[in-house]
Every structure is written in C-alpha cells, then in structure tokens.
C-alpha cells in the first residue's frame, strides 16, 4: 500500500466491465489500498473474482447498475474505473452523473460510442471534413422498403470519394467493417446488410451502420488521459496492419519523439486530440484514439474515454513510457502524486502472432529465436501449440489469444525485420484438409 495512504479511509471504486483486461486495473487499485467493486453481466468474468466485491449485473441496464451500487445511505463509490470497454461506456458515464463523481459524463460517453454522433460532433468543431451517412438497420423492413433504403443510400454515396468504409454504428474493434473501393462494392455490401428473404427467414442486419469516406495515410493509435480538462498525451503508436479489406492491426511501434520528424508528428497529434477532447467535453478519464495521418493532416477515426486493449495500456505502454495509465488514473482520483507525461519513450514493437491459416507443426522455443545483436526480446507470451488449427486473421478476435512478443531496437525497420524472422520460425501447414 502507498505510504501515507490511510487504509481506514480507503477509497472505494466501481469497475464497469470485468473482463480479463480489467485485471491489471484491479491489481493497481488494490496495491494502492483502493477497494474495488466490479460489475459484469457474465458471472464467470475474471474481474468479478479478482475484485473485493464482484456483482453479476447486466451493465447495459443502467437502472440495475444504480440499484446495485446505491447503499442504504444512498452513498455510492468514490470514483469509476473502466477497462477496454465498448458501447456501455455510457453506463460508466451514467454512474458518474448519478453520484456527482469526477469523470466522463453520460453525454460525452454517448458521443464517444455512437460513431454517427461522434462524426457530427467533430464536424461541428471543424475537426472532420469527410462525408458520413447513417445506415439504419434493415431488420423488420419489407423487401420494397429495403430496396428503397439501398437506392437512397447509393444516391447519397454518389457524392462520396472512394475508398469508403461501412462499419457498425456502435461497438469497437474491426468487427463487421467493410472497406470499399467503389460504389459497386458499396452496393454489394449494403445488400449483404439488407439480407434476403428466403423461406420466410430474413438475414437483414439488426444494427445501424455508418458509411463514410476513408482517409488516406498511415494509421496510428494513441494512449492519453484527461487531467481535469487538460489533455495529456502518453504514447503515439504506429500500427502494423494486414492488407485490405481486413486491415487488422497485428503490431504497434512506439513513436519516441527522438527525431525532429517524430517530435513534430507528436505535437500535431497532441494539438488535434486536445481540440477533439474539448469538443467532446471529456474530463478526468483515460483515453484511446485511432488516427490516420497523411502529411500534415491528422484524421481522427475513433476516440473513446477508456484505455486501449490488446495488452497495450496494461503492458506495452507502461514498458515503452514508464507510465502505468491505470495506476496513474487511480492516483489522480485518490489525491496521491501522479504524472501522465513520460520523461522518455523507448523504441519498442509489440507483435501479435498473425500466422498463416493452417495446422501448426512447430512452435519455436525462446532459445531458438533469431535476434540480431541490436534487437532485444523484452516479452514473450506464446499461447500457440503444435497441432493447433489457426484460422484466417480477419479481426481482433481472430488474432488475440494467440499471444504476443515485444522487441526493443534502434529503428522500426530493424524491429520489423527481427519480428518477421521470429514468425518465420513457426511451421504452419497451409494445406488444410476437410
């Protein structure tokens, strides 16, 4: 426990969402003497067992969450914690509003999690110039109504510049995303969502989508925080992506700022995201963003008031910067000393095991890994075993769970070459039978 922190006056935090990636936050809180009540709709969620109190509550139901948190005296938690939470970040905002806590409001959470409203809010602030249209759910519509909706959307898309993206209005990650190079491909994707009526069964999509012009450039991720209303940037990460249409991130390079070009890039990102955080009225929260950068243009793809997943906020970012985002946020809420900005950033690469589809025949041991003298292995967690059947990498779920490794080196080029050498040591039979 932190010296000088009185256990008799222990702070009480509530954690909304208790999946595996919440464990790091729970551990950080307990090290600081903070009591954690975790809520999740899955009674087997790992965080429910790790917390001081675990409650199996549907976090999509704000009324049930409030009832579970409000004691007989009406007093609730001292502050709210979240892990890499998706749509129901709004519940965290609702708890903050109900108990008058420091942190994101429900309205700001709605702007973060609703991709259409997010676009509209940033457009109003002059931070988004791309075209974007709402695609209402097709489920429940007649065939004539669905045809009319598709025709109307295609008419609107005539003004679009391609490529374009069609993605779910809510949710996170690369689930259900279409990357489209022409209006003909857009039409096919819309009809896929509209579904077909066959023997009385409809395959029409039950959720809203948005279609928007895709920005050109190189994709980046950002870990940051709002200290009060002041934007604090922790780490800029360049993404290593699979080819279109999946464009799944299979690695991240830390941007150190040691060169003049990197330092300028970091400043541009900081300026743009500071404006965006202000437009979304974010305060006292951790933040994650995805960007597309081309020349001096910084385009904000998505932004949310929650930490990043995929072992970034809990492992890669602390290793690269020395800043543990979760612990620092808890310190800020508890009145303990804290600092978000790193004093120095190491040049690291986290690489996930995006291997070919097939049956694994050989998995290298750490001792077998071919590393040049100027590249060091800093972390290794391989969950792949001989005999495993690997599917195609099409989204985050298809690559996560296999593990990762982290390298440190002098340049991104040397790191990428070393990572490719490591992956080349795996033997996968790509000729699948049956």
Image (cartoon, grey):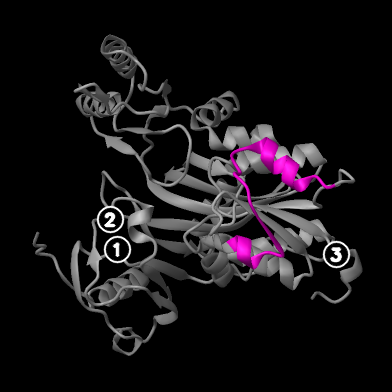
Residue with the mark numbered 1 = 354
**Contact check, label 3 and label 2, Cβ < 8 Å:** no
Mark nearer the N terminus (3 vs 1): 3
Q: Position of residue 102 (x, y in %)?
A: 79, 46
Any magenta on residue 52?
yes
Residue 28, compared with residue 180, is above or below; it is below
Residue 303 visible in the snapshot:
yes
**Contact check, label 1 and label 2, Cβ < 8 Å:** yes
Q: In this view of the protein, which residue sits in the foreground, 134 or 11?
A: 11
Task: Specify few, some or many for label 3: CA neighbours under 10 Å numbering under 14, 14-19, or 20 or more.
Answer: some
**Residue at 54% in and 27% down:** 117
Q: Tell me the number on the disc at residue 393.
A: 2
**Residue at 62% in and 53% down:** 224
**Contact check, label 3 and label 1, Cβ < 8 Å:** no
Mark nearer the N terminus (3 vs 2): 3
Q: Which residues are magenta?
A: 47-71
Q: CA distance from mark 1 to mark 2?
A: 7 Å
Quadrant of the snapshot with the N terminus: bottom right
Q: CA distance from mark 3 to mark 1?
A: 44 Å
Q: In this view of the protein, which residue sits in the foreground, 38 or 102?
A: 38
Quarter of the image for residue 54 reads bottom right
Residue with the mark numbered 3 = 10
SS of the residue at dot 3? loop
Any magenta on residue 375?
no
SS of the residue at dot 2? loop
């Amino acid at each position: 426990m932190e010296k000088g922190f009185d256990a008799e006056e222990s702070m009480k935090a509530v954690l909304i969402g208790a999946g595996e990636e919440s464990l790091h936050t729970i551990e950080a809180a307990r090290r600081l003497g903070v009591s954690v009540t975790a809520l999740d709709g899955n009674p087997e969620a790992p965080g429910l067992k790790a917390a001081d109190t675990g409650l199996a509550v549907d976090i999509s139901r704000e009324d049930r969450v409030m009832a579970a948190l409000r004691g007989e005296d009406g007093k609730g938690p001292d502050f709210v914690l979240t892990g890499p939470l998706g749509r129901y970040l709004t519940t965290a905002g609702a708890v903050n509003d109900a108990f008058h806590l420091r942190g994101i409001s429900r309205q700001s959470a709605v702007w973060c999690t609703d991709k259409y409203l997010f676009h509209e809010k940033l457009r109003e602030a002059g931070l988004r110039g791309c075209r974007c249209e709402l695609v209402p759910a097709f489920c429940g519509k007649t065939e004539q109504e669905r045809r009319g909706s598709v025709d109307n959307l295609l008419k609107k898309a005539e003004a679009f510049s391609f490529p374009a993206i069609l993605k779910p209005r809510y949710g996170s990650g690369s689930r259900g995303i279409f990357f489209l190079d022409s209006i003909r491909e857009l039409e096919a994707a819309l009809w896929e969502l509209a579904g077909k009526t066959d023997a009385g069964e409809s395959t029409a999509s039950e959720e809203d989508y948005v279609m928007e012009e895709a920005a050109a450039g190189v994709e980046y991720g950002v870990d940051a925080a709002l200290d009060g209303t002041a934007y604090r940037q922790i780490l800029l990460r360049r993404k290593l992506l699979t080819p279109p249409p999946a464009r799944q991130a299979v690695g991240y390079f830390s941007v150190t700022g040691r060169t003049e070009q990197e330092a300028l890039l970091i400043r541009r990102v900081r300026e743009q995201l500071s404006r965006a955080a202000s437009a979304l009225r974010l305060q006292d929260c951790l933040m994650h963003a995805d960007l597309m950068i081309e020349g001096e243009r910084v385009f904000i793809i998505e932004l949310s008031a929650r930490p990043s997943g995929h072992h970034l906020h809990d492992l890669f970012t602390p290793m690269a910067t020395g800043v543990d985002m979760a612990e620092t946020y808890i310190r800020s809420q508890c009145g303990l000393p804290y600092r978000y900005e790193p004093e120095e950033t190491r040049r690291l690469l986290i690489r996930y095991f995006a291997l070919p589809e097939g049956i694994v025949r050989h998995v290298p041991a750490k001792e077998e890994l071919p590393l040049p003298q100027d590249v060091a292995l800093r972390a290794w967690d391989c969950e792949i075993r001989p005999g495993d059947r690997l599917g195609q990498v099409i989204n985050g779920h298809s690559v996560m769970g296999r593990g990762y490794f982290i390298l440190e080196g002098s340049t991104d080029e040397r790191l990428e070459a070393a990572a490719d050498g490591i992956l080349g040591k795996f033997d996968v039979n790509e000729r699948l039978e049956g």
